[in-house]
Every structure is written in C-alpha cells, then in structure tokens.
Image: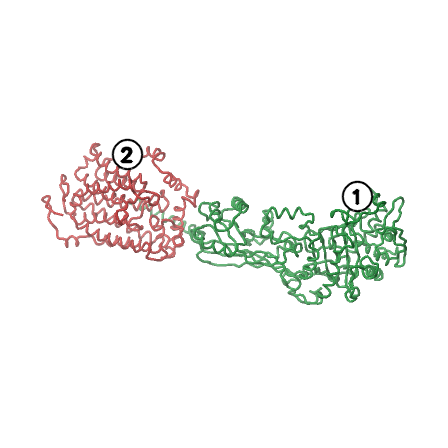
Amino acid sequence: MTAVFGVLAGRLYQLQIENGELYRNQAEDNRINQRLLAPLRGRILDRFGVALAGNRRNYRVLIVPEQTRGGVEVTLDALASIIPIDARTRAKVLKDAAANRSFVPLVVAENLSWEDFARLNLDLPYLPGVQPEVGDTRDYPYTEELSHVLGYVAPVSPDEKISMAETLAPDDPLSDVPGLRVGKRGIERTYEAAIRGRAGASRVEVNAYGRIIRELERDQGTPGTDVHLTIDRELQSLVHEKLKNDSAACAVMDVDSGDVLALVSTPGFDPNAFNVGLSPEQWGDLTNSDYKPLINKVLSGAYPPGSTFKMVVALAALDAGVITTETTFSCTGAFRLGTHDFHCWKRGGHGTMNLRLGMKNSCDCYFYQVALKLGIDALQAGARRLGLGQATGIEIPGERSGFIPDRYWKQATFKEPWQIGETLVASIGQGYVLATPLQLCTLAARIASGRQVSPRIVHSLGAQVVPRSVPEPIGFSAQALAAVREGMNAVTNEPGGTGYWWRIPDKQYAMAGKTGTAQVRVITRQERVTGVRTNESLPWALRDHALFVAYAPINKPRYACSVVIEHGAVAAHPNVQVARDALLFAQQRDILGRAPNYPIKSAAALL
Amino acid sequence: MTVRPYDATYRAVPLTHKLADIQWTLVVLIALIASFGFAALYSAAGGGMSPWATPQIVRFGVGLVLLLTIACVDLRVWMGIAYPAYAVAFLLLVAVEISGRVGLGAQRWLELGPLALQPSEPMKITLILALSRFLHGLGPDDVSRPLRLFAPLLMILAPAVLVLMQPNLGTATLLVVGGALLLFLAGLSWHWIASTGVAIAIAIPSAWQFLLHDYQKQRVLTFLNPDTDALGAGWNITQAKIALGSGGFLGKGFLMGTQSRLNFLPEKQTDFILAIIGEEFGFLGLMLLLGMFVAVIWSGVRISLAARSHFGRLLAMGVTLNFFLYIMINGLMVMGLIPVVGIPMPLVSYGGTAMMTVMIGFGLLMCVHVHRQVTVPSHSSGMI
C-alpha cells in the first residue's frame, strides 16, 4: 500500500514538477490557435486616384483537417448540404488535404452570398474543423478594360511558395496564409513584393472542438503599398470601348515624360475570374481564341511596323545627309533593283516625290530609293535611337523588344550576307523589322518631343515616387525633326494624305500621324498580274494589319498614340481612328493640365 | 424487523451511545475528500453548480445519512443479510445482462422506475459482505483447502464474468483482485496466490485473443503508445497528462484550468476528475488529497485490526481494500501508468451509484468500529 502511494506521488512529482514546463507549453498549444491574417493588398490607382484594383469583402469557408471529426470527406459532405460544393472543388480540397500538414486550413468555398454564409454560421456547432472567415479579396471594378495593365492575382503555386519564402522576412508567415493570392501578371506581378504587405496573426483561445472562445492578441499585419499609375482610367475606357471587338492594341502617352495614359490590348479578360478560379471551359475559351485575349499585344505583340517605319528612314536619312527635304525621287509604281521589281502600294505610281509628299502619300518607291542611299547600318542605328529594337523598359512583365535587323545578325543567323533588297524591304517596315505597339507610340513621342522619352506607367509606390531622369535630347537636328513632323502633318491634315480621313478638324487640337499597313502574306506574281486581292475578300487571319501612329497637338505636342488592329486593314482602316478619338479626348479632357492625385505633388514628381 | 438475542455476548446498546461512538474524525475526513470533488465539479462546469456539483452534494448528503444509519445497525444484522443481499445483487447483474440499457457503449445500467442503477456497484459491497460471512466460519487452515475454496471462488468469479460481459473490464478486475486479496488476508496460503498469479500470466495472451473487446485492446495498445493516436483513443491519456503536468507545483488556481474549461479533457467530471484537481490545485493539492486518502485507509486498517469478530475484521478490511484499489487504479490510470479502465475516483468522481456504494462501504466500516467489541461465534450466521 505504501508502495502504491509512493508510486502515485512519484509519478505526480515527475509529471507536475519535473516536466511541468513541458506540459504547460502543451496546454498553451492546446488552447491557443494562431490564425494567420492575410494583409490587405495595396490598391492600384490611376493618376486621379481612381482605384483600378481594390479589395472587397469575401465570405469564405475553410476546413482545418486535424480539427474535423471523421475526416475531411465527411465534413465536406456535411458542408455540401449547406453551401454549394461542386465535384471539382471537392477533389481539389481532398488533394490539398493530402498535400498539406493537417493543421493548415484549406479553403473550401469563397465569395459566398451573405445568406449562405449566415446559414453556415448557424450550423457551425455541428461542424467541427470548419472555419468561416470574412476576408478580403482582390476586386477589379473595370474588369476587361485594364486586364493587361493590372494583370491578376491567383492562388500561389508550390514553386512560387518556395521562392516567396526566400524573399520574405523570417518572421513573416505570409506564405502559409490560406488561400493566399499573388500577382501573376501585369503590375500585380511586377510590384507583388510591395503590394502584398506583411501577414498578421490573430492568437485566439479555442476549446477542444476548435471553437473560438476569445481573441488574445491580434497583429493586424501591414497592408500592402498602393501603386499609383499614370493611367487615366477614362481614356483607357474610351479606347477599350472602341477596340473591344477587335484584336488590337493601343498606347497613349505623354510625349514629354513618357507617362502612359492608356495601354489597351483587346480582347481582354476578366481578372476577377482568375482570382475566383477559372473553370476548364473558361480557360479553354481564353487560350483557344484566335484573338488571343491572354496576350498583352501592346507590348508582347511584335508586328511589322509597315509604313509607320518611314519616319525612321526619313530621320536617319536626313541625319546622315543622304537626302534633304528637297531631294526628289520618282515613283512609277515599282522600283527595279537588279532583276527584281519592288512594288509601290499604288499601282500607277505617285510620280515625283520629295520627303513631304513621300510621307503624305506613303510612297514606297520614294523610300526604297532613300534606303538605297542610306544603307541598313545607318537605318538600324537611327531606328534604335528612336526606341525600336529594344525593350522600352515599361514596368509590366512580358515586354518584347521587337527587332531591327543588321548585316551582322543576318550573317550570324543565316550564314548569308545582307542583300540590298532586304534594305528596301526594311525601309517600308516589312521583312525582318518588328515593333511592338508600345514602341511605335514611343517612336511618335520621340519625334514629337525630340527627346529620348521612354514609357512608364508607375508614378509612385505609396508615397515613394519612382525616380526618373529627364529624357536626353534625341540627337537629330531640329531641321530633320521639323521636316518629318511636317510630313506627318501632311499625312493627316492635307487633302490626299493617307490619314486625311481621320484628321482632327479643330486646328487647336489637330494631330500629325502616319498610317501603316503590315502585310502578313506574300503577294504572288500571279496576283500582281490579275490584281492584288482586296483585304475584304480574304479570310480574317490573312488580312493585313492596320497601324497608325500620331501625336497632338501639332504646335506644342503633348500626347502620342499608336494603334495596331490585327488584320484590320480593310476599307480605309476604320478602326485605327481610335487614335484620333483618343488624342482628341485627351486634349479636351486636358489630362496633363489637370492636377493628378498622386501622394506627392511636387513639380519634379509631375515629370 | 424483530431483533432477538442470538448469543450470550449480545446486549442491546442505546442508539445515542452508538452515535457517540462513531469515529467523527473519519466522517469529517470523508466529507473533506468529497468537498475536493465538489470544487472540481464546480470548476468542470465552468464555474457552476449545475450540472454536476449540486446532484453530487445531494447524493453525498444522502450517502452520509446512509453511512450513519448503517453504522448504527447491529453488525450481526449485516452478517445475517450477507447472502440474501449478494443473491439480490447477482440477480440484478443477470437482469442488466438481459435487459440493460446501453450507456457509454456498455450495458451497465438498469432502470428501476425513476432510478438508473449500475448493478455492478452493489455487487462490490455484497461480495465483500458475502465473502466475509463465508470466511468468518473458517480458520486460517481451512481457507487453503481446495474444496473449501470452491464456494468463495465461485462467489467471486460468477459476478466477475457477468460484469466482464457487460463489458466492464475495470470493475471485473476489481471484483477478482479485491476478492482474492480478502481470501489472502483470511489466511489463504501463498502457494495459491503464487500459482494463481502464474495461471493468470499464462492466461493473459489467450484472454487478449478471445475475451477482450476491440475497444479494450485499443485501450491497452493506446496506453502503450498514446502518441500514435493522439487525436483518437490516446486523446484521454495525452490530455490528462497535459492537464496534470501543466498544473505544476501550485496549480493554475481554482477555475483557471484551461484543459478542463476548454473541454480538452473528456470524461473530466467522472474518471478523469483527478486531472482537473491536478491542473487547478497542482502537486500540492493532489498530495493533500492523497494524504487524506492515506489517512482514511489507515483508519480503515485500524478499525479492522481492532474488531473482535472475524466477520468484522474481514468486512472492514474488505471495504478498506476496495477503497484502496479504486484509488490506486484510478490514480495510475489518470497519471498514465496503466491503460484506461472505467474506474472512478471514489468520493471525488461524479456518479450517483458509485457514491452510494462508497458511502455504504464506509457505513459498514463504521459499523464494524461501533460494534468492535461484539464477538461472533464461528458457527454463527448473523441475525435477522
């Protein structure tokens, strides 16, 4: 008997005195549950402070596998009688449950209606392991209009989770936040680190069934930083509205600072759908469409610039001194080099052309002959000075650099010397020459301002202005620039100019521009004889691309714009007039004259 | 009831003398131990008299009256009704086996009108009574004779088998061990004890195979390694250890135990009540409780040794022994030293039938004390 009481006392001593600390900790672990709080993502705002990406309330349901009675499957069955759970969600939750440690909460349903959420809360006592949660989720109020600028957020992938853990502060549990979304494209992705903030945590006392008794402490975390864009939401909407039925791209920028006011690629997609989760059908529609809604054409689409490249040839030639504004060449409808005829777009030819007329009529033969004197090396150097053949460095991922060929590249790639004829093809923006719509807009802005402006879309992160230097002069003589501007003026403002159709009649707002048509097929010799087939008679995918670049107003340029309509070169390119609409709208709205709503309002910040 | 002189030594003692003769210190000690239980039940309910503390206090009050009443009834009366009482308890066990209602996964409860009765509890008392009655007439030499031993062994094993079938391994074990120890104290030779021990050791593997229910096997396996199933069957053991251990030396304080308040401890008001006490009152509180238990047992042993009748000695020893076994098994179980068996902590755990059994037992013990001078001839069969 003494022995038994000795054993009992000894055991108590061992449990309570010797290992007391250990069990005290376990009791604390028992009673205290740490819930991670996703930080509020920083908003993305336009230049006037309009929220382009914000956050909205999100009623959601999580399951903590280790707290369920009878396992995740049983709990899902019980849940399914209260809220809708489809087979796909069910499979995903079970897969997640197998892949994660059992205390990691799994998201079962999100964006529940208030009715469903309230009903669920009522049944909560019978659903151990189920956690209702009122969180915040990303909201893109302008859906498709800004999809390519903003990008979207989606659940973090396992790879991202690993790379994230390396960039986070050691005490930041962000990567374990259930249902965490990270930026996958666009600004959301570029500035992910700033936008996401630091995760917080709530320490709550729970009972054995996981029910929260009270909150002990709460670290709200740090909300993410707001990103202020240079976009003007209204201009963006206007352009998107005009182009939404095309596969097209359009950029509008401030010619002095390079601030991008609109950056549109159509068709877009609804970024909210990615946040909520796409069904396989939705994904299939997005990836299989000929209009390629997932490609940000304005900076990931590289097109032959066509005749919009002629400004580059003209500037390079004037700068090199191989022509003057009065140098004339004749156009008979074709230019013969050796045994090969290089055709002008106009069958009968244009007659005698100087620079102004060559640009106004977009005469191919004129530029063939200019290019012949200029040579590919000088042409390539001029093109690069105007921002072509290299990425503009805009703060959106996925930008392509376009391409300006040279003889070394040709030799290295094809093991063949550069042909003179290829210079002629390049001079009308065909052949190897490729440019993105954003580069073409930059080109127009550089011609208009005479400075090496580059586009930028982010003005400031929180109160921190993204530093930016004043663009250097482009290095072309004032006379050369004036001559090219004069040519562009003739295109849009003189009767007979290829862009006269879209002129802005009001002198105050008048624009200068240049049309372009990018051929996507080879015109056969047979066709030359029987007559070139009209674009209208061709299937959509074989029609030429329609291009237009412009700036306005003529006297004191403020805005530059470029438009590319894929396969849109039908009957006077009706849709490229969006450039005119955008430039007119921008001027009348006076975007640059209105005070932007950036957190820092200094003169330097405006630039 | 007609009371008549049965032998020469009998003489009527006035009731007031009997009451004055009661060991009031022992009664106070029992009340103090029960109060520990009240406090723990109050705390287990999150600081409320319902649902546990109030019924428990009422039952203790009734039990106290019962104790005093039993103590004042002549010892030989209890001797006289020993066999009939045993027979009634045995029949109740049979009845529960036939028509018991299922409570807590086992057929242990019998409904008699408004009362829900656990017949295994009265059996604990009546077995002691009946064994004491039987052994009273045997000298130490007689006990070890195989033929003489047949009847007491049957008296022990028959109810034990019925209880095991309920199934209630803990109580069955207690009946067998308690009965066997009583036989030993009555003079059973060491040879019997030793050979039985060996037989049991041999029988364990086959018992494991054929007699134990799955849940009982699970309990044993879980006990051996609670961490393998920390959320299932090992939960009780793990959480009880955490509750006890986290109490430390002084405890977390009355009503401050998180393990019990937040329901981490299942069955906290019954079998695992020691964990609440350990969590809230710490090592000090439990040592005080154990100290009081030791004092009660010590009193019981002294009462037994002081009794002049063999029946009285055996009865007092049997009651004390049973009390001790309960404390031992429950204590070892809560502290994680033996598998979980459904044995409550006497006087402390919540439960009506168990409380009555314990109080009746103490009543008999006190009766032996009050009637310690009474001698009973070896051929006597008590009085009715």
Give the residue displayed 39% in from the left and 46% down from the top: B237
Looking at the rendered structure, the secondary structure element under dot 1 is: helix
Residue with the mark numbered 1? A412
Query: Would residue A564 appear left or right of A199 to someone viewing this image?
Result: right
Q: Amino acid at mark 2?
A: Thr
How crowded pointer 2 is (Cα within 10 Å; few <14, some 14-19, many 20+) is rated as few
In the picture, the quarter occupied by the C terminus of chain B is: top left
Depth order, front residue of A33/A397: A397
Do callouts 1 and 2 point to residues on the same chain?
no
Give the residue displayed 32% in from the left and 57% down from the top: B49
Query: Would residue B67 appear left or right of A215 to someone viewing this image?
Result: left
Residue B373 higher or lower than B206, as above or below: below
Query: Would residue A518 appear left or right of B114 to someone viewing this image?
Result: right
Chain with colour green in the figure: A
Circle 1 marks a residue in which chain? Answer: A
Q: Position of residue A408 (x, y in %)?
A: 81, 46
In the rendered image of the structure, the colour used to display chain B is red
Looking at the rendered structure, the secondary structure element under dot 2 is: helix
Residue with the mark numbered 2? B196
Asked if residue A441 can be seen in this view, the reply is: no
Circle 2 marks a residue in which chain? Answer: B
What label sits on residue A589 in the rendered view?
Answer: none
Q: Quadrant of residue A146?
A: bottom right
How crowded pointer 1 is (Cα within 10 Å; few <14, some 14-19, many 20+) is rated as few
Q: Position of residue A309 (x, y in %)?
A: 80, 54
Q: Quadrant of residue A492?
A: bottom right
Q: Position of residue B197 (x, y in %)?
A: 29, 35
Q: Amino acid at mark 1?
A: Ala
Q: Position of residue A529 (x, y in %)?
A: 85, 45
Discs 1/2, front: 1
Circle 1/circle 2 CB separation < 8 Å: no
Asked if residue B345 can be seen in this view, the reply is: yes
